[in-house]
Amino acid sequence: MENKKENITFELASLAVSIRLESIPPHVLGIARQAVLDWLGVSIAGADESITDKLVEFMVSEGGHPRCTLIGNLDRLPASAAASINGTASHALDYDDVNFSVPGHASAPVLAAALALGEEIHASGARLLEAFIAGYEISCRVGQLIAPNHYSSGFHATATMGCFGAAAAASRLLGLDADATSRALGIASTRAAGLKAAFGSSCKALQVGEAARSGLVAAMLAQKGVDVPEDMIGHRLGFARTHSSDWAELCALRSPRYVADFAVKTTDEAPVYDYHLETNLFKYHNSCYETHSAIESALYLARTENVEASNVVALDIHVNPHCDDICNIACPLTPLQAKFSLKHTVAMALLGKNTADPSAFNDENVADPQILALQELTQVIFDPGLRVPETIVRIKLRDGREVERKHDSSRPENDLNAQKKRLTNKFRALCEGHLPLSIIEEIERNVFELESLVNICELVRLTARTAR
């Protein structure tokens, strides 16, 4: 029997169990509520995506007890199926929030699992928030344990780390103690999966849905007493040792740090936070987060230097070499591939096409002659001196001018009131055409008063097609 003091799985489980709503600072609770609203918005819009429709069709044909809401649908299914479908929907647009500690999309799999199970057991809003924050924390901490090699080796950390986060969140909702939560994390170790090779395809979102489902099932099996060897995360043949050449126990257990670059180890000197949720990054462009600095640079130059696409002679995008495996599809053939193309997204920005609007990523823009012409003029230049979130866009113009802009997308927002307003606008834009305004406003009210909800069922059910 292993000593629990040297058992990273048990230590992480103990940390998850120790998180209590009453000890969480108000500003962290505010970010958590914002994350819930953002997740609901991207899920409501993502429910109409092809991958979500196909998954619903398949799982409904499989059947099961109709206990939980499928966002944007008439059908109801068991909690595990709902977690998979809603988790997939939440990532189908690739518009959900990001945390570099994972590195990836921390909220999507955790909230998909927590909301499905929370609806089944009629959890309160306070319990949901507590479980979400605990699950989010564990996703980031396991991410830091094996960073940066895990992600750079080709694993889709949103899915792999999300499985652990979903298991932790579900364990909290089920009221599991540290021993049982440790078993849940151990079972999750046998189920966590996801590959970056899927980027630009529907399987990227599918991996996130499966992470939510697998984590939820892991917690439910642990509750039923399913056994698993101790320390499945830290065992020499366990998850961490087989999925990364890095082992950073200190990073996993210390106070959270600001991650300036997920391609390198986070230093102890980096700014310190109380919760990983404080470094959450929301998306305001509907494309891969590593394209956002380039988009912001292009928008800045168009706005301040009067750059017009017709006057561009050459366009250089300087990025860290790791971006080649993340967002450098040179000639995208589908709208989904376009979201992972630096050339395409910068061309959209310079042509005034709204990268915040999911409908702007369409077949017409993929084949647009003006976008294709700008893509031909664009070079992506790899510069190891740049951090992954940094980009320099340099443009040569017909009048002989050269203009450039550098942007860093790694910094979390400090003005939480401004962030709330911006996210509320994003939420409304995403829900428009999917839900009536009265329902949209009711969801907003419920989310921003989440701790006072006695039962989250009504909130979740507002997102179903029957509520329209």
Image (cartoon, rainbow, N blue to C red):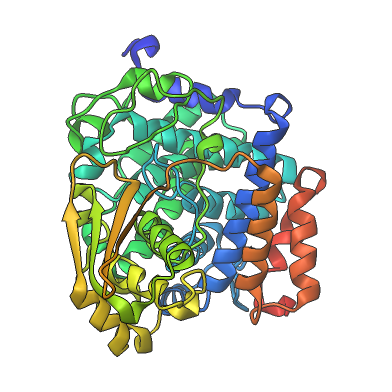
Residue 288 place in picture, x, y as percent: 37, 60
Residue 276 versus residue 302 in the image, above or below: above
- Residue at 44% of width from left, 26% of height from top? 257
Q: Out of 42 and 407, give the one closest to the viewer.
A: 407
In this image, 12 relative to 413: left or right? left
Residue 311 place in picture, x, y as percent: 31, 78
Residue 66 versus residue 222 in the image, above or below: below
Residue 361 place in picture, x, y as percent: 41, 78
* Quadrant housing residue 52: bottom left
User: Residue placed farthest to the front in the image?
Assistant: 399
Location of the N terminus (image quadrant): top left
In this image, 206 relative to 455: left or right? left
One can see residue 277 in this view: yes
- Residue at 59% of width from left, 77% of height from top? 73
One can see residue 57 in this view: no
In this image, 107 relative to 191: left or right? right
Residue 149 versus residue 325 in the image, above or below: above
* Quadrant housing residue 374: bottom left
- Residue at 25% of width from left, 24% of height from top? 247
- Residue at 45% of width from left, 54% of height from top? 213
* Quadrant housing residue 266: top left
Residue 240 versus residue 214 in the image, above or below: above
The mark tally for this picture is 0
Location of the C terminus (image quadrant): bottom right
Residue 404 place in picture, x, y as percent: 32, 56
Q: Out of 261 and 90, give the one closest to the viewer.
A: 261
